[in-house]
Image (cartoon, rainbow, N blue to C red):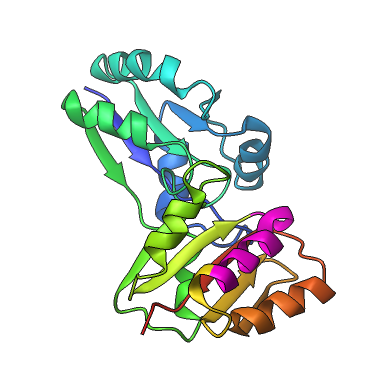
Amino acid sequence: MGKLYLVPTPIGNLEDITLRAIKVLKEVDVVLAEDTRTSGKLLKHYEINTPLQSHHMHNEHRQVDGLVQKMKEGTTYALISDAGTPAISDPGFLLTRACVENNVEVECLPGATAFVPALVNSGLPNDRFVFEGFLPLKKGRQTRLLELAEETRTMVFYESPHKLIKTLTHFAEYFGEDRPVSVSRELTKLYEETVRGTVTEVLEHFKNKPPKGEFVIVVGGKK
């Protein structure tokens, strides 16, 4: 019987990978990668010569059954995403669920995930929080925002640069202009930045400084 390893990869700084992750990536039979070009650079950096296979949101449905069958026959896979921990707003859940249902062993290594440093350095309560990932683009967005307006726990979101202003504007509208928020961008990278304040203050900052990079938004819960 083979096995599936879920292996977190750096979210920016290539040094943010564990010794165990490097060992696993070298020892498995195949590495399943969201984008083989992106992951190829990481593997080359650490002199990992394991074969790469593309596994992303557009083909994972077609691949799951075949991959599970190969694991039953003895193949060992490592699943990685472009950055961070697989299945956290990235592919991974479908394959993990299929392995569990078919009694194929799954092991997830600890490692980089963007929302953890953003939450911890936000200065907002982190003893209880909810991770929302990306909000719905259109259908269901208003409904979700109305529900979250009553959430008392700290909330964590992912957002792309071209939608950041829109999302912060919606937060001001649904959560209130004075709701505390912390926005982190380019975590672990050269131009890492965290902006804290009210929704209005942070929105004004990014209106004057066009957003670039990948963003994590941390919002205080309703008091």
Q: Is residue 217 visible?
A: yes
Q: Is 156 displayed left or right of 151 in the figure?
A: right
Tell me which residue sits at (44%, 79%) in the image.
Answer: 220
In magenta stretch: residue 169: yes
Which image quarter: residue 24?
A: top left
Residue 101 percent coordinates (x, y): 18, 27
Tell me which residue sits at (52%, 83%) in the image.
Answer: 180
Q: Is 164 displayed left or right of 110 in the figure?
A: right
Give the overall secondary structure of the magenta segment: helix
Which image quarter: residue 201?
A: bottom right
Q: Is residue 188 visible?
A: no
Residue 88 percent coordinates (x, y): 43, 49
Viewer-closest of 61 and 172: 172
Instruction: Judge whether 114 appears above or below 97 on screen.
Output: below
Q: Which residues are magenta?
A: 160-173
Instruction: Judge whether 187 appears above or below 202 on screen.
Output: above
